[in-house]
Image (cartoon, rainbow, N blue to C red):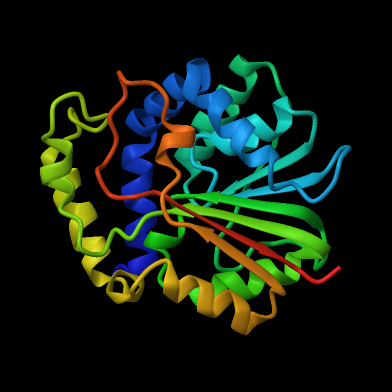
Amino acid sequence: MESLQERVQAYWDKRSADFSAVRQKELKGIDGAAWLDYIRKFLPCEGTLDVLDIGTGPGFLAILMAAAGHRAVGMDMSPLMLKEAKKNSENYGVHVDFILGDAQMPPFEEASFDVIVSRNVTWNLPDVHGAYTGWYGLLRRGGVLLNFDSNYGPVDFAANAAEPNNVHNELDRELLRECAVIKDSLAISKEARPLWDMYRLKEIGFTECRCCGDIREFVRKDEMMRYDSEPLFCLYAQKKG
């Protein structure tokens, strides 16, 4: 029988091409620059950093970090997403090391990174607490985790996608139904986010945790690209220096 993890991977393999097309538009437009400006405010120090983009998908955050001069690694469980990510980084003219891996068990040595970034990933992980624990170990002292996500548990994906000009408007409705089934099967969908995340991050050992409940005004500048209607939160957590 197919496991939930395998089902999630298969779903994102199917979504790789259309999802990549959305991220390409962001990279080429004003939203890409807006994301980079927002992230820069939270980086732990000046100079070149080792950055891991977990659940990189088509490589959006990893490409932005590489373009800013950092050593970027992008990891994803979907081989087809990684294929898109490599193509996107080449088109963007930057180098990123892309590897296949599970966000809940990243294949790296402890204390390998100064920064970990993640966008719209934790909502579809079977074990978010376990993932956070592993990510904590991968950070060096003083390292920073930036997790961007939404409380998708109560969201109706099909209704959102049906809105005019939504970036997922042309997505196959069968895929939307599959996404809803996966979401409703995950424990994280039943939690009150991002408060649940903040509690877990502090419990794991992050000494400074902050949350912005909705960053859409800072990173979604392109009025021609409409996203899902729920708030996009930013979780900032720093490991003791």
The answer to whether any part of residue 210 appears in the image is: yes
Q: Residue at x 39, y 24 (%)?
A: 21
Q: Residue furthest bottom?
A: 203
Q: Residue at x 80, y 68 (%)?
A: 110
Viewed as shown, does residue 144 lie left or right of 212?
Answer: right
On the image, the x and y values in percent for residue 26 come to 46, 24
Viewed as shown, does residue 19 lie left or right of 236?
Answer: left
Image quadrant for the C terminus? bottom right
On the image, the x and y values in percent for residue 154 come to 20, 63
Total numbered labels placed on residues in the image: 0
Image quadrant for the N terminus? bottom left
Viewed as shown, does residue 240 lie left or right of 40?
Answer: right
* Residue 9 to residue 96: above or below: below
* Residue 177 to residue 208: above or below: above
Q: Residue at x 19, y 53 (%)?
A: 178
* Residue 111 to residue 116: above or below: below
On the image, the x and y values in percent for residue 161 come to 17, 37
Quarter location, residue 67: top right
